[in-house]
Every structure is written in C-alpha cells, then in structure tokens.
Image: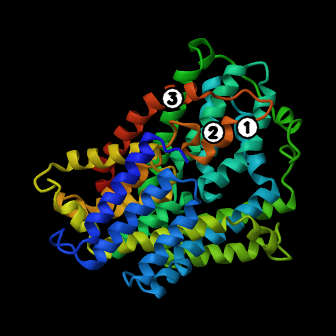
Amino acid sequence: MTLSLRQAVGWCAALSACAVLAVPGNVPGLGGDARITLAVFALATCAWIATPVDDTYIALGAGLVLTVTGVISSETLFATLGDATVWLLICAFVLAAAVARSGLAARAAAFLVSGARTVRQLVHLTTAALVATAFAIPATSGRAALALPVFLALAKALADRARLVVALALLFPTVILLSAVATLIGAGAHLITVSVLWETTGEEIGFARWLLFGLPLAIVSSHLAAETVLLTTVRRADRTGPVRITAEQLQAHTEQPVTGPLTPAEARCALLLGTVVVLWCSEPVHHVPPAVVALIGAMVAASPALGTVRLKDALGTVPWSLLLFMAATMAMGGALATSGAARWLVSGLPADGVPPWLFLTVVIVLSTAAHLVLQSRSARSSVLVPLVVAAAGTAGVDPVVAALASTAAAGFCHTLPASAKPVALFADVPDTPTYTPRDLLRLSLVLAPLTAALVLVFALAVWPLLDA
C-alpha cells in the first residue's frame, strides 16, 4: 500500500504519541486511563484519515479497546445505543420514510419553486425548501437522497440553461450541509456534541434549545451561501434574468404527483409531521422528551390505519452503520472527557488570559479546516468537541457556545467532492450538467471564510443574547 505524505505524517505522529504514552513516567500528570484513551484516539484518528477501513469498524474497535482496558465500562459502551438521542434519530428516520413514501416533499418543493420569476428568486426559494427539510429528514445524506429527484426535475426543466443547472447542483449540497445545524437531528455530530457536553459539564441541550441556537444560523448561512453560489457560478446578466418553471413542467419529469389536491396520504403525513415538529419545538411547555414525541410519531406513521409506510420498510431506511458509529464515537468522546485526557491535552495551551474572540476564532478556523483531514463529520466532533469544551473553561468561554461553534463550523465540508456524501452525490449525476472540482474549489475559497466569520459573529454576539 502506498501512503500519501499526509497519511505517512499522520501515522508517524500517531505511533510516536503512542510510544510516548505507553512508557510510564514519560508524561507527568497523565493517569493510566488518560494514557490509554489518548493512544486509542491517536490511532483511531489516523486510521480514519489514512486507511480505507470502514469508519464504523474503526470506531467500534476503539470503543472495544477502551472497554477491555477498563477505561469505560461495558455498560457505558452499550448504553450509548440506548441513548434518547439515538432513539430520536431512529424514529426520525421512520418519519422521513413516511414523508418520502407519501410524495409530500416533492409537492412542497414544486409549490415553492414554481413561484419563482427570476433566477435569484428560484435559488432562494429552493434554499428555503432545503432548509425546511432539516425538520423532516435526519442526517445530511438522507436529505440529499430525497432532494436529488427534485434537482433532476429542475435540471430537465432548465435543460437549455446549463450554467444555471450547474449552480443548482452546487446549491443543493451546499445548503443541505450548512442548514443541518438548524435541528438536533440534522447531523449525527450534533448528538455527539450534546453527549460530550452532558458528560463534561452537566449541561443538557434539548431539541428546543438547539433550535434556538441553530435555526437562525442555518437560515442566514444558507441564504448567504445561495448568493455566493450565484456570484461564483452564474454570469451577472443571468442572476436577475427571468425564469419560469411550472408545476406541470416538474410533473413531466417526476413520477410523484406535484399538482392537484393533496392525496389523503399526503394530508395525513403533513398533519403528522407538523404536529411532531410543533411538539418538538414546544418541549419546554409540555416537557415531553423529543424522543418520546418522535416514537409516537413513528408509530402513527407506520400504523396500518393512518400510516403511509410499513414499519419493516421504514426501519430498512435507517442507516444502522451510522448509528453504531455514533454510539461508539459518543463513548470515545465521553472517555476523552472523563478520563482527564482532554483536560491534559489542553493544559499546556496558552488559553489563560486569551480574549474570548481569539479563542473562538481559533476553534472555528480549526473546525472549518478539519474536513480536509477527517471526512466524517461525527469523527471530527468526537475528536474536537471534548478538547474545545476542556479548553473553554480556561479561556473563560461558555463551553456550550464553544462546542456549538465548533460543531457548526465543522458543517462546512465543501472543498472536495469526497469531503461529504451530499457533495459526492451531486458531483456525479448521469446525463446532467454538474460541477467540476474547480467549481467546488472556487466556491469554497469564498464561502469558507464567510461561513467561519458568520459562526464567529453568532458565537460572540447572537447566542449569548438568545441564551440570556
């Protein structure tokens, strides 16, 4: 096997760290559990970076080593699969399967984009529709799969305007990734962040509190990204040029009905989804946990009388590999926080006396660039968030704000087609004009600093006001 320079350097660093940590007395102030945790993390991180081995297999192996060596108990490892947030995600996937089966998503998208009269309106209405899917479809890969047929219908309706189709191809994955921060179920990394904060600080972030922090950022960053896509992809004359897409045009290129009155299944699904989202958002009022609300919604969605999908079929859409990966990385993140390894790692950093804005700037820049090394968003959070939370106290920064800033910044992963699954999915669409790596790089050079600056503004000025 031939290693790239990045992979070779990563492995050398990991093996060197393990060698140092394995020798007792070499690292003052570092206990045995912390040594093992750091060694496991170093090897797991480099395996994620440098090997083709499945990410979930690596994470499970790391969790197993931590359990066998006694750093965490077997109950701790297995309990992560029974965590309420994991159940929330499972039930959300069942609800998503019901939405997809009913055809409601395609109809809602057609309703929005058919109202566009200019290219700019089309782009921003599409953006609004994609942001809304964060409440219905968990995880970015699921949203990308649901949105792909809508994009294909738009691409066929705009077949004579190839550059606009390329812009839409860039827009879909860009908004899907940036708007994931809107909800707790938007990405598996969010569940890891919540778990680490609970293990480390005792701070509990539920669906409603995450929504308060994440939704405004998702809306602003998504529409800012939409303008950036227009500026970097479409000529000035085309940005304000007329466009007319009718629901009938879209219907000609999709099998799901997008015109006419709602079918009974669509009406039931819309009512159920609206009720679930309202109950999620009003958790502080009724105090019913989001996971319980999601389970009730999933049972209704799969019921013989009122449902639109069989439970067996819906459970078949759940990415169990992702859930296992999340459970294992949640255990790893907890071990990094509770063993003292995270605090030891940041103890030598000059965080004491550093201005909060500078600390958050460093966190956001590192988190934004981390996708160039670690492709998995969940892996990035399991490595970065425990360190950020541990260092935040020394820097005088609210750990919740620091963790959210890191997680939100890590949502930027647009530089390469392989940086994220939605980017890879829309980069290779048969018989449809789509973006090249050069288009993606041109967008990233502008969008990366813009989104990083926006997250910094929210962390310094907006979130403290919202949490007051």
Can you tell which mark lies on residue 151? 1
Q: Which residue is outermost to the top?
A: 237
Query: Considering depth in this image, is 274 or 203 the residue closer to the camera?
Result: 203
- Mark on residue 441? 3
Along the line of sight, the residue nearer the viewer: 246 or 141 = 141
Quarter of the picture containing the C terminus is bottom left
What is the quadrant of residue 439 in the picture? top right
- The kind of residue tagged 2 is Phe
Q: Residues within 10 Å of mark 1 (few under 14, many from 20)?
A: many
- What amino acid does circle 3 point to? Leu
**Mark 2 to mark 3 CA distance (whole Å):** 16 Å
Label 2 residue SS: helix
Q: Is residue 83 left or right of residue 268?
A: left
Give above or below for 291 relative to 413: below
Q: Are marks 1 and 2 in contact (CB under 8 Å)?
A: yes
Q: Mark 2 or 3 closer to N-term? A: 2
Residue 394 pos. (x, y %): 17, 61
Secondary structure of the residue carrying numbered label 3: helix
Q: Which residue is mark 2?
A: 172
